[in-house]
Image (cartoon, rainbow, N blue to C red):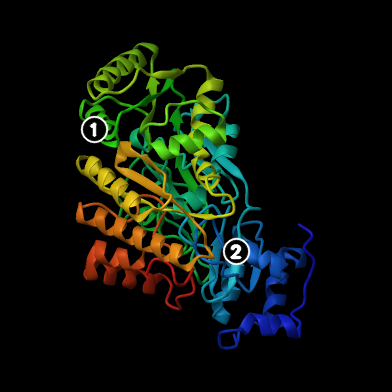
Amino acid sequence: MALGRRSLGPAARRAYSRGAAAKAWLTEGFLDSLRAVVGAPNVSTAPAVREQHGHDESMHRCRPPDAVVWPQNVDHVSLLAQACYSRGAPIIPFGTGTGLEGGVGAVQGGVCFDLTQMDQISDLNTEDFTVAVEPGVTRKTLNNFLRGSGLWFPVDPGADASLCGMAATAASGTNAVRYGTMRHNVLNLQVVLPDGTVLHTAGRNRRPRKSAAGYHLTGLFVGSEGTLGLITQATLRLHGVPEATAAAACAFPSVKEAVDSTVQVLQAGIPVARIEFLDDVMIGACNRFSHLNYAELPTLFLEFHGTEHGVAEQVQAAGEIVKSNGGSDFAWAQEQEARNQLWAARHNAWYAALALRPGWKGYSTDVCVPISRLPEILVETKKDLMESKIVGPMVGHVGDGNFHCLLIHDPEDEGQRRSVADFAERLGKRALAMDGTCTGEHGVGLGKRQLLREEVGEVALATMRQIKAALDPKLLMNPGKVL
């Protein structure tokens, strides 16, 4: 990555301090200390590079860091963190930039740690179903690596995200109903704390399936969104590739019938692997974007895993429930290529939604409620979208009560921006009123801090602040996020 050494000239200095007090730590000597660790080509203050690292896929405006560094290993991360800690420079972790809540914005400036060059896969143990990955390893890279081993990693948020980034945001996805989220599939983490100390949350090289030894530090860092430390390695739980797989789509007369079917499938104990909901607007967008021809009605995408006999039984039982709710016959995608096309259409839903209004931006909401409240909240949300006249196709991992509205708007139109923000807040409060959460998988980031307060209450929030202060007393780790 030959970015070259870029000195901090007068114009750059003025730009960095614009709108804020001059940063005492931002000196050529400090940048030289970073270059001494990783080499000049792996430190950049170029405006274009900084801007690239100041935003994710969210609607939050870009807030670039003052410098970007590319460590190659955990020792580099530790030394760089020490340098930042001693100078009081904020630290912002960066993976693939696919987050949806502004988690990588440098709200106080600082140094962005781009961890993508740390891309080693190690300690694969096929008998124990475990593997260790560095932050530069994405979920697709890992599953390509595992091909032929009989194992795979099923947590699938759609984007080809960094696995350590997925741990940091407690990511979920289409397979969560059967295989769980990142919280269920991370066994150990190597974390560099703000002062450069290296922590192994479950002990060095430990990878048991369960443990009752002390506080659950691994769980503390999963979902911490880079506010407590930098995750430099994750030990993951793997799963066996199913013997048989069947996927299908099914249309319904209304949102309620589709979601009622979901609830009944789960209540019947059918071990469905994926059950995804797309409303009529989303199906229409996917048809046009992915060249499909599904009926433009509320639709479920389902997938079943198991033995040949087991899958056949699951399909029959689910089919009976679907028909009792007015659903159409299953439209099968049985061959691997057809299944890939079906799920590619689902994963491209974000881009399909954006294509409804070329040139506009999107904001993906994210709430989760108890399964029993899912029909109610989806019907109310659909009504709210129509009354608000917002372009907001709906899609969801409804098997675990999690869904999204992809709110398409003109970011230059202040009225539309306000309307979208107000709708997102109403949706979050609606989920909380139904005993749910304001975020099932995207995280709190910049935009949901007030909703977090309402969700967990002052005592829990104060406890979180105490944990933050204990691990990050200078408040340098990804400031402005979560709390």
Which residue is tagged 2?
113
Towards the viewer: 210 or 358: 358
On residue 158, the disc is none
List x then y, in percent, for residue 137.
58, 45
Tag 1: amino acid: Asp
Which residue is tagged 1?
260
Towards the viewer: 52 or 244: 52
Tag 2: amino acid: Phe
Within the image, what quadrant is residue 175 found in?
Answer: top left
Asked whether residue 98 is in view, the answer is yes
Asked whether residue 274 is in view, the answer is no
User: Dot 2: what SS?
Assistant: strand
In the rendered view of the protein, which quadrant contains the N terminus? bottom right
Q: Is residue 79 above or below residue 361?
A: below
List x then y, in percent, for residue 47.
70, 70
Towards the viewer: 218 or 176: 176
Towards the viewer: 322 or 17: 322
Inter-mark Cα distance, 2 to 1: 45 Å
The residue shown at (25%, 52%) is: 436
Marks 2/1 in contact by CB < 8 Å: the verdict is: no
Within the image, what quadrant is residue 314 found in?
Answer: top left
The residue shown at (77%, 73%) is: 6
The residue shown at (56%, 33%) is: 290
Mark earlier in primary sequence (2, 1):
2
2 or 1: mark nearer the eye: 1
Crowding near the residue tagged with mark 1, few <14, some 14–19, many ≥20 C-alpha atoms within 10 Å: some
In the rendered view of the protein, which quadrant contains the C terminus? bottom left
List x then y, in percent, for residue 269.
23, 26
Q: Is residue 417 above or below residue 289?
A: below
Q: Is residue 97 above or below residue 175?
A: below
